[in-house]
Amino acid sequence: MSDNDEKMEEILETLKNGVIEFEEDEVIEAAEEAVELGLNAYKCVMDGLAAGMDVVGEYFAEGEYFVPEVLMCADALYAGLDILKPHIVMGENQQIKGTVVIGTVEGDVHDIGKNLVKLMFEIAGFNIHDLGRDVPLDNFVESYLEKDADIVCLSAMMTTTMIGMPIVIEKIRAKNPNAKIMVGGAPINPDVAAKYGADATGEDATNALQEALNMIGVLRDLSDFEAERKAQELDADSLMEPV
Ligand code: B12
């Protein structure tokens, strides 16, 4: 293991434990050190900060942590994210890839996962319109139309709020049957996504981005196909024109 690898392991551990133990100052210090050393900022977010939040989730489920502790953990996570975010690079290809509307559905204030998905999309070069959390269902439809979005992303973390997703999907599809919609969050799996009529899901932010890139590919193919069909129609029309 090189010195850098060892340092990376140490920093990941500090970031993870800093989130779990809501030690915001330690998280800030470790994040700053990672930046100074030029370590992989994306890995620090996913394998450090987000990994810590996973453990917090277990503590919450076991009744070891309650809402106040979880909120302090989230504060520590965001403090690290603020420092690391500007240092995440995704390769050279930074041109705008498409427009995404994202938000956490009505009744649900969980936004940490949604914000990580948003972060991935941003650094990959998508135009993002973040509606925030606890978003009234109709706002997704309005924003989809207003922004002429390529993809709509819905996040939900509770079984009581995920049921808003198929309602949004149905309303958007009524406007455009070909609209591309992704759903995600802890209670969502591929079966639920398919049942709700979504085009895709992703178990984490990296998968979400991959799925989005696949969908953008499909969209481009569809518009190429449309353009080709229109060109053929024009050709046919000109052939039928009287001379
Ligand atoms: C943090 C947290 C909170 C924080 C939220 C802070 C915030 N700003 O987000 C606070 C303390 C406010 C909170 C409140 C509550 N919570 Co809470 N909370 C959690 C906890 C511990 C962690 C969630 C989290 O941030 N995980 C870390 C992130 C990184 O992971 P993630 O969200 O899953 O996101 C990833 C993927 O899911 C995916 N993803 C997410 N969104 C999307 C979208 C798309 C399109 C795609 C493709 C992918 C994708 O990518 C993300 C990044 O990798 C979970 C436990 C758990 N195990 O999930 C409970 C949990 C979600 N909470 C729960 C509950 C019950 C509540 C409360 C009702 C508690 C209460 N008694 O008041 C309230 C609800 C308030 C409300 N109306 O929403 C339950 C839900 C149970 C259920 N099945 O419905 C859980 C599961 C805990 C439990 N085991 O009981 N909570």
Image (cartoon, helix red, strand yellow):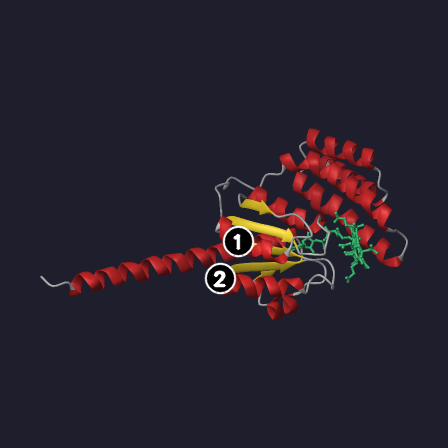
The residue nearer to you, when weighing 65 against 26, is: 65
Q: Is residue 36 left or right of residue 68?
A: left
Q: Which mark is residue 205?
A: none
Residue located 66% across and 42% down the image: 42
Image coordinates for residue 15, horizontal then vertical, percent: 78, 40
Q: Is residue 122 positioned above or below 241 on the image?
A: above
Q: Amino acid under label 1?
A: Tyr
Residue type (three-letter) at the residue carrying disc 2 = Lys
What residue sits right under mark 2 in the picture? 175
Q: Secondary structure at mark 2?
A: helix
- Rendered position, 161 above or below 6: below
Q: Is residue 105 left or right of residue 126?
A: right
Quarter of the picture containing the N terminus is top right
Tag on residue 144? 1
Number of other residues with Cα within 10 Å of mark 2, as a class: few under 14, some 14 to 19, many 20 or more = few
Residue 38: x %, y % from top left: 66, 32
Residue placed at 86% from the left, 43% from the top? 21
Assign the C terminus to one quadrant of the image.
bottom left
Answer with mark 1 or mark 2, whichever residue precedes in sequence.
Answer: 1
Can you tell which quarter of the image residue 119 is in?
Answer: top right
Q: Is residue 149 visible?
A: no
Q: Is residue 132 left or right of residue 21?
A: left
Residue drawn at the location 54% of the way across and 51% of the way down: 143
Decide: marks 1, 2 in contact (CB < 8 A)?
yes
